[in-house]
């Protein structure tokens, strides 16, 4: 803009003005203007937020609105918002499983992340669906399914991951599979899951020759 704003008006005046504006906005009930303040204010006013997942009444409202929803961005956002609720609500699980077959690969991608989620451990059909998504027609969906499959800590995924690791033509997906196996035996930071089978397959892969 052709001006040195550090000198004029100066950083201290800028920060002071920012703080005063936030104070006045807060007194008047408006949203703050500081970094992330807008998001915090929107969450506070709409109540659509929770560190533990979706708020129950809002979740029901979202599910009802999705019955006839076709907008891809709305569906993508819904999958992301409801990702941690699959184990708590069969309707949510059914919705995300449905989105895993959506024609838009970005929605399928987000569904794979939701399904391959520690919050989804024990949900009927989750393991089978994530395994099926490893064969998705889109490479990015395929890769994320392989990478997140280990978070379900179901040894049923080890076979498909091992098959990919043994296929040199699928070398672009080897990192994703190795990461998934590591999740199953190392499980940082809690170390609650220590699959010996996953550990063995991982070590066998490291011994594979020729090495890249």
Image: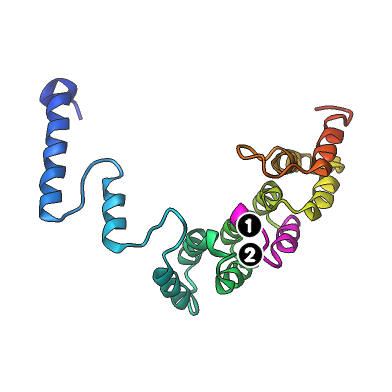
Q: Residue at x 12, y 23 (%)?
A: 8
Q: Quadrant of residue 117?
A: bottom right
Residue 67 located left or right of residue 102: left
Residue 194: x and y in percent read 74, 41
Residue 100: percent from the left, percent from the top? Answer: 63, 64
Residue labelled with disc 1: 112
Residue to which mark 2 is pinned: 100
Residue 200 placement, left or right of 178? right
Q: Dot 1, how many residues are within 10 Å of its Cα: few (below 14), some (14-19), or many (20+)?
A: many
State which quarter of the image contains the C terminus: top right
Q: Which quadrant holds the N terminus?
A: top left
From this view, report whether residue 152 is shown above or below residue 19: below
**Horizontal and vertical percent position of residue 2:** 19, 26
**SS category of the residue bearing label 2:** loop
Q: Residues within 10 Å of mark 2 (few under 14, many from 20)?
A: many
8 vs 166, left or right, is: left
Cα distance, mark 1 to mark 2?
A: 7 Å
Magenta span of residues: 117-136
Is residue 131 magenta-colored? yes
Quadrant position of residue 97 = bottom right
């Amino acid at each position: 803009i052709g001006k040195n704003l550090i000198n004029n008006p100066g950083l201290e005046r800028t920060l002071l003005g920012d703080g005063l504006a936030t104070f006045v906005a807060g007194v008047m009930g408006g949203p703050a203007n500081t970094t992330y303040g807008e998001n915090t204010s929107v969450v506070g006013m709409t109540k659509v937020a929770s560190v533990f997942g979706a708020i129950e009444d809002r979740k029901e409202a979202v599910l009802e609105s999705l019955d006839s929803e076709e907008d891809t961005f709305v569906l993508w956002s819904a999958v992301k918002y409801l990702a941690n609720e699959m184990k708590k609500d069969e309707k949510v699980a059914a919705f995300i499983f449905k989105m895993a077959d959506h024609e838009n690969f970005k929605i399928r991608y987000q569904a794979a992340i939701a399904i391959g989620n520690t919050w989804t451990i024990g949900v009927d059909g989750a393991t089978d669906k994530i395994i099926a998504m490893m064969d998705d027609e889109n490479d990015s969906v395929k890769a994320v399914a392989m990478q997140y499959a280990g978070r379900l800590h179901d040894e049923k995924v080890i076979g498909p991951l091992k098959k990919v690791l043994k296929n040199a033509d699928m070398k672009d997906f080897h990192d994703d599979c190795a990461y998934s196996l590591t999740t199953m035996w190392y499980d940082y930071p809690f170390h609650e899951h220590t699959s010996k089978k996953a550990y063995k397959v991982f070590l066998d892969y490291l011994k594979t020759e020729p090495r890249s």
